[in-house]
Image (cartoon, grey):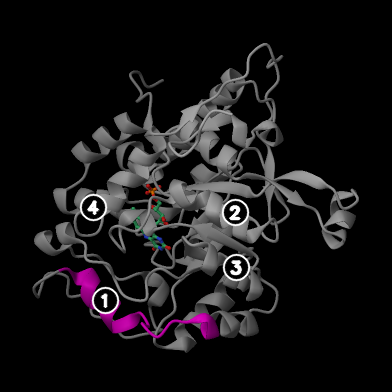
Amino acid sequence: MEHNLPVNVREYQELAKKALPKMHYDNINGGAEDEYTLRENIAAYGRIMLRPRVLVDVSKIDMSTSLLGYNMPSPIIVAPTGPHKLANPEGEVATARAAAACNTIMVLSFGSSCKIEEVAASCDAIRFFQLYMYKRRDVSATLVRRAESLGFKAIVLTVDMPVLGRREADIRNKMVCPPSPNLEGLMPFDDDLGTGGGSKLERFASETLDPSLSWKDVEWLKSITSYLPILLKGIVTAEDARKAVEAGVAGVVVSNHGGRQLDYAPPTISVLEEVVKAVAGAVPVLVDGGVRRGTDVFKALALGAKAVMVRPDHCRANSCSGRWKILICLTALQVGRPVFYGLAARGEAGARHVIEMLNKELELAMALCGCRSIAEITRRHVLTEGDRIR
Ligand code: FNR
């Protein structure tokens, strides 16, 4: 039995900082340019207050929900971040086991340091695969086919990275990072790790990522995926959310890449309502960036709850008849760095503990706000700076 386990995500972050070489910690923790978006992702949650309702019997709290038809014990899932061997020699296999132990979904990054096949074989779980669009479309197509045949349940196309953001810590540290084994045999890559100015990531990104990425490619991706749903990760405006729905995707992820791409992009929690409104219940909305507490998860769920007119086609599924209905439009929250911190500090056990802690914190926030189920969390449980108490 270990004593003195960290009691929150911030303590895990401290341990991770001690455990990791500076270059790796800076890469995981850092953001783009002035790191305004990175800081604001977290700070914006701090400006939202809770409006607890009391005298509700909270002896039973049910956090369960579902995403794309998969039931989950809580809305917290694991964001695609890579490569996990920077944090622990077991890499994504450890994270996959931690997520499976919590019965939650892990989104595996294309850039995982364990091969996608190895992660798939490590344990039974529902997993999604995150993809970038490569200049060489055959590489993207091959990765999609591998994910399909290995039982991944969705493709998450990251759309906020046509080119790499300017991560100054990586440039300063001349960040080097082994190429992902997923690309072995698919494209030539040199694994000469220590040369050149700037960061190795920059060179890799400029050689491989396709800056011509556009809505056409979403069509293309749909055409090569026989049955997997496609989610778009990196949507922060109502305009793009509407286009995503029109393009026929199965979900959108409100994300600014954890503040690692466009600095001064809005903190995700500040645009969540705008996106939820634009999507109007057509597809699930997910969000990531800055979640460090169960209360953050609660705040996002409250801002993601929306009254929508349920249309006849929806009605059949929900057995109701054309009425206004509160839909939980925000169905899942992805956590990125917190899981990485857990992994760096204590391997698989740490990653699992981080997810468990966030779940426990969410349960507590729900109890203290008088919400017994996710459906009971409403917009009126939070107060943002823009709100006036009604
Ligand atoms: C990321 N992120 C990311 N996103 C993606 O689509 N593909 C990827 O390979 C990666 N890799 C990656 C590595 C590291 C070290 C970090 C910190 C982030 C972004 C990630 O999916 C997510 O959007 C953010 O991490 C969410 O913010 P928080 O939870 O870290 O604050």
Query: Which residue bears the numbered disc 4?
Result: 35
Closer to the chain start, of discs 3 and 1, is 1
Residue at (43% x, 54% y) in the render: 92
Q: Give the Cα distance between marks 4 and 3.
A: 28 Å
- Quadrant containing ligand 1: bottom left
Instruction: Using the image as rendered, state which of residue 228 and residue 42 is in the foreground.
Output: 42
Q: Secondary structure at mark 1?
A: helix
Q: Secondary structure at mark 3?
A: helix
Instruction: Using the image as rendered, state which of residue 253 and residue 16 is in the foreground.
Output: 253
The numbered mark at residue 242 is 3
Between disc 2 and disc 4, the foreground one is: 2
What's under tag 3, amino acid-wise?
Answer: Arg
Between disc 4 and disc 3, the foreground one is: 3
Q: Is residue 102 visible?
A: no
Q: Quadrant of the C terminus?
A: top right
Quick one: label 1, few (<14), some, or many (20+) residues within 10 Å? some
What's under tag 1, amino acid-wise?
Answer: Phe
Q: Secondary structure at mark 4?
A: loop
| Residue 159 lies within the magenta run | no
Which range is magenta?
199-217
Closer to the chain start, of discs 2 and 4, is 4
Q: Give the Cα distance between marks 3 and 1.
A: 32 Å
Quick one: label 2, few (<14), some, or many (20+) residues within 10 Å? many
Closer to the chain start, of discs 2 and 1, is 1
Q: Give the Cα distance between marks 1 and 4.
A: 22 Å
Instruction: Using the image as rendered, state which of residue 212 and residue 386 is in the foreground.
Output: 386
Q: Is residue 13 left or right of residue 377?
A: left
Q: Give the Cα distance between marks 2 and 3.
A: 10 Å
Quick one: label 3, few (<14), some, or many (20+) residues within 10 Å? some
Query: Which residue bears the numbered disc 2?
Result: 276
Query: Which residue bears the numbered disc 1?
Result: 204
